Image (cartoon, grey):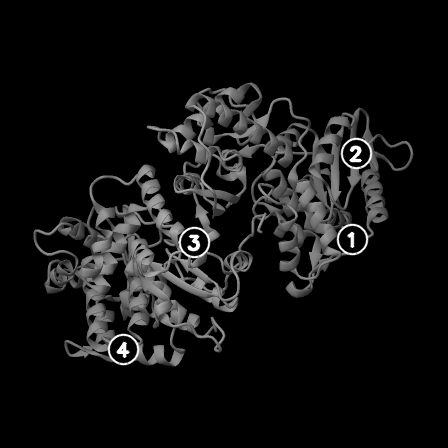
């Protein structure tokens, strides 16, 4: 059984349209398949984003099926699973480019749409892009590299550029051909289709339609058709007016870039060519492409035997209307009008909300549950999920009789760097198991009281265990997990006339209101928030009567250093560290990796503990010599104050130096509280600075104490460099103080020495 968060391992290759998808990491999928299914057992991905479940199941000796109701998702998964060899992609794209079009090759015809002249030498060039002003409705700049004079960059458009653009019909045959592929006159969706076509400039719309028509004409029925459609799909994304943004938005920005379609096509072709050269599966067990099918959950439920599945593992569809609108557009464009019907429920005027999402998810999970064997599981892997999405998945599971078995999360960024964002992303791992139905619940008031008491205990316990102020995501997860462990959520589903989501939200809100006597909300600087109307989500939460923070990061750092002495390999140590912090004790994002880089060295397969420098005597000698040179009385030895290895004194001004190979934040708090009133500087190895910056970023209370105190850091290397100078003064020392000192930054900082 998996009892901890499994972090994803980085991938070398880029998945097509990854910014819209939530692809599951192969190493995470592999671990869940191994833990929750047996060789020969059946694994299903009902909302496949990629072919990862097929790949990992085959490697583990399982049978697998992947499906999606969206033809576009199926195209991406199938086309990337078994890309043809690079030479076959080369031949197909060459044939496409050489195809005739109005007395020239298609390649030349499309390229000439972006022909211009060099602003400097006036020779003909081909623009890579044009920059448009949406309000003026015209391009204002062109970007190119001139092969004649090597001018490169963005330059103003001229009259000939506007004349070239004016020759392209905005509502030519190509436009009506494409519009009819989406919706016939008078048909539902016609108006939406017209608005979606406005996401492309007339020139790019013309070029892209000609490309897609030629692909259909030349390669219909060919095994390589899906590969070319995937190349086109990438172009449809990168050549729209919104190119360069993250998630989909349906209104173009005020200024946007119009890509050269043929250049975009060549980039997409090279991306897939690179993917095809990497072996994705062993040649001994090639899965049939039929293992990835276009099928709804209802279709899967009718085609598979009851209790035939050991594991359902998937990344659930997002609540993202703009992406579904683009999916509708691109599906009709590439695959025809018949394939767009599945998107109609997502596109109607009523807005999609989380209640709608929960109802749809519950219906899907109810059908999938019938396919699961006893004690079978549904696992959701969200790499960029949101708090509300995870919550609705858990509630939908409770509605259909699934017990939340595991809930693990890790924010995608450190807490204080994302605190004020309305939308924050986290990685979630949710596993739900078939279980016996719950007992008859108590009355609603009694159940509400139990849920509030349980939620309060869960929050209190987690804050003490992690030892640092936490984002609301953590408290939210702790509450859901505790309610599920005590079967309170499933009992709430039996209350008559009560919305589970509303009932759970009310108990969570009441818990937080009642807890304000015990908890305190903090801002990103560690200051107490006095605004009573502050959103729970925009605060960090901490205990009023808590002892000094004892951050989880201190324990992670200690354990990682110990494992570096025993375990070989970067990834092996990383995996072992995560396994030692179960439940909601997941290390902060990037922490384990930063510790490994700070303390380890070697090749990834033989990553071992770096032996610390024997520098104590050297640093003491340098500090004594520098202190005397700068006019201080400097000494080391028995007469030193507490928490000091070297002292400098000049009148009433004193400086105390500590030399440390590592610094725990708990120790740092203690030193700040116990140390005498003086300027304190801690000397640390250079490689420790990045780790300490990350640690302090996630610990606002300790960062606040350090900022308000006279404590700071100096790296060994910077002290050596100052000591090696022939001439040195106190101003030189100002430049080297801090984890990111002025010598490394162009930003001015306040003087730290008089």
Q: Is residue 609 left or right of residue 427?
A: right
Query: Which quadrant of the figure contains the C terminus?
Result: top right
Nearer-N-terminus badge (3/4):
4
Q: Is residue 312 left or right of residue 659?
A: left
Marks 2/1: CA distance? Answer: 23 Å
Which residue, given by chain and number where applicable, does mark 3 sit on? 372
Marks 4/1: CA distance? Answer: 62 Å
Which residue, given by chain and number where applicable, does mark 1 sit on? 612
The image's mark for residue 222 is 4
Task: Give the image location of residue 153, x and y in percent.
Answer: 36, 60
Task: Give the image location of residue 217, x and y in percent.
Answer: 19, 75
Nearer to us in this view, 100 or 608: 608
Nearer to us in this view, 502 or 190: 502
Q: Secondary structure at mark 1?
A: loop
Nearer-N-terminus badge (2/3):
3
The vertical placement of 290 against 303, above or below, is: below
Marks 4/2: CA distance? Answer: 76 Å
Circle 1: is it few (<14), some (14-19), or many (20+) Cα within 10 Å? few
- Is residue 439 among what the camera can see? yes
Q: Secondary structure at mark 2?
A: strand
Which residue, given by chain and number where applicable, does mark 2 sit on? 656
Assess whether mark 2 and mark 4 are in contact (beta carbons under 8 angstroms).
Answer: no
* Image mark count: 4
Nearer-N-terminus badge (2/1):
1
Q: Is residue 449 left or right of residue 725?
A: left
Nearer to us in this view, 207 or 599: 599
- Is residue 271 among what the camera can see? no
């Amino acid at each position: 059984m998996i009892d901890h968060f499994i972090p994803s391992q980085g991938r070398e290759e880029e998945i097509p349209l990854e910014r819209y998808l939530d692809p599951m990491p192969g190493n995470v999928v592999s671990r869940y398949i191994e833990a929750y299914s047996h060789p020969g057992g059946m694994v299903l991905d009902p909302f496949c984003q990629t072919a990862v479940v097929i790949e990992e199941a085959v490697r583990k000796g399982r049978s697998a099926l992947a499906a999606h109701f969206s033809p576009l998702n199926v195209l991406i998964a199938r086309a990337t699973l078994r890309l043809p060899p690079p030479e076959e992609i080369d031949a197909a794209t060459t044939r496409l480019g050489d195809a005739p079009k109005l007395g020239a090759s298609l390649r030349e015809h499309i390229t000439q749409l972006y022909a211009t002249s060099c602003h400097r030498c006036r020779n003909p060039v081909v623009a890579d892009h044009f920059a448009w002003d949406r309000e003026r409705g015209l391009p204002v700049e062109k970007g190119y590299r001139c092969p004649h004079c090597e001018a490169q960059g963005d330059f103003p458009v001229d009259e000939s550029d506007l004349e070239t653009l004016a020759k392209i019909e905005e509502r030519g045959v190509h436009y009506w051909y494409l519009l009819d592929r989406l919706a016939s006159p008078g048909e539902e969706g016609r108006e939406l289709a017209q608005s979606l076509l406005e996401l492309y400039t007339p020139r790019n719309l013309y070029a892209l339609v000609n490309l897609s028509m030629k692909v259909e004409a030349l390669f219909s029925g060919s095994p390589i058709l899906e590969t070319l459609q995937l190349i086109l799909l990438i172009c449809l994304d990168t050549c729209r007016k919104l190119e360069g943004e993250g998630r989909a938005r349906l209104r173009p920005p005020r200024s946007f870039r119009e890509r050269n379609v043929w250049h975009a096509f060549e980039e997409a072709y090279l991306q897939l060519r690179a993917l095809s050269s990497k072996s994705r599966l062993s040649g001994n067990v090639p899965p049939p492409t039929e293992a990835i099918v276009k099928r709804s959950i209802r279709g899967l439920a009718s085609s598979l035997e009851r209790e035939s599945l050991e594991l359902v593992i998937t990344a659930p569809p997002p609540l993202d209307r703009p992406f579904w609108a683009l999916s509708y557009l691109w599906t009709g464009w590439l695959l025809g009008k018949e394939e767009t019907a599945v998107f109609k429920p997502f596109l109607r005027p009523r807005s999609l909300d989380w209640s709608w999402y929960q109802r749809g998810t519950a219906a899907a999970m109810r059908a999938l549950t019938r396919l699961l064997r006893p004690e079978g599981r549904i696992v959701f892997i969200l790499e960029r999920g949101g708090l509300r999405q995870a919550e609705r998945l858990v509630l939908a599971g409770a509605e259909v009789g699934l017990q939340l078995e595991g809930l693990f999360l890790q924010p995608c960024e450190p807490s204080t760097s994302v605190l004020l964002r309305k939308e924050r992303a986290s990685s979630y791992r949710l596993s739900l198991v078939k279980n016996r139905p719950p007992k008859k619940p108590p009355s609603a008031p009694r159940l509400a009281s139990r849920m509030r008491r349980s939620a309060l205990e869960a929050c209190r316990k987690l804050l003490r265990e992690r030892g640092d102020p936490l984002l609301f995501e953590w408290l939210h997860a702790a509450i859901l997990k505790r309610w599920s462990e005590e079967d309170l959520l499933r009992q709430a589903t039996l209350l008559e006339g009560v919305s589970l989501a509303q009932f759970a939200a009310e108990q969570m809100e009441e818990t937080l209101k009642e807890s304000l006597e015990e908890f305190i909300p903090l801002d990103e600087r560690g200051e107490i928030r006095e605004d009573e109307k502050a959103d729970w989500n925009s605060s960090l939460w901490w205990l009023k009567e808590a002892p000094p923070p004892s951050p989880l990061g201190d324990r992670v750092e200690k354990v990682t250093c110990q494992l570096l002495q025993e375990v070989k390999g970067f990834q092996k140590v990383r995996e072992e560290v995560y396994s030692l912090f179960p439940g909601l004790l997941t290390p902060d994002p990037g922490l384990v990796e930063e510790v490994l880089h700070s303390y380890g060295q070697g090749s990834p397969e033989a990553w071992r503990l770096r032996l610390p420098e024997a520098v104590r005597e050297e640093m003491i000698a340098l500090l004594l010599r520098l202190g005397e040179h700068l006019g201080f009385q400097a000494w080391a030895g028995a007469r030193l104050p507490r928490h000091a290895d070297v002292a400098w004194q000049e009148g009433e001004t004193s400086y105390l130096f500590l030399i440390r190979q590592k610094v725990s934040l708990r120790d740092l708090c203690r030193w700040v509280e116990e140390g005498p009133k003086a300027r304190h500087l801690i000397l640390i190895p250079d490689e420790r600075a990045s780790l300490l910056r990350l640690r302090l970023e996630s610990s606002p209370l300790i960062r606040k104490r350090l900022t308000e105190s006279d404590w700071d850091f100096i790296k060994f290397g910077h002290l050596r460099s100052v000591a090696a100078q022939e001439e040195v003064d106190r101003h030189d020392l100002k430049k080297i103080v801090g984890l990111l000192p002025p010598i490394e930054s162009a930003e001015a900082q306040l003087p730290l020495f008089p």
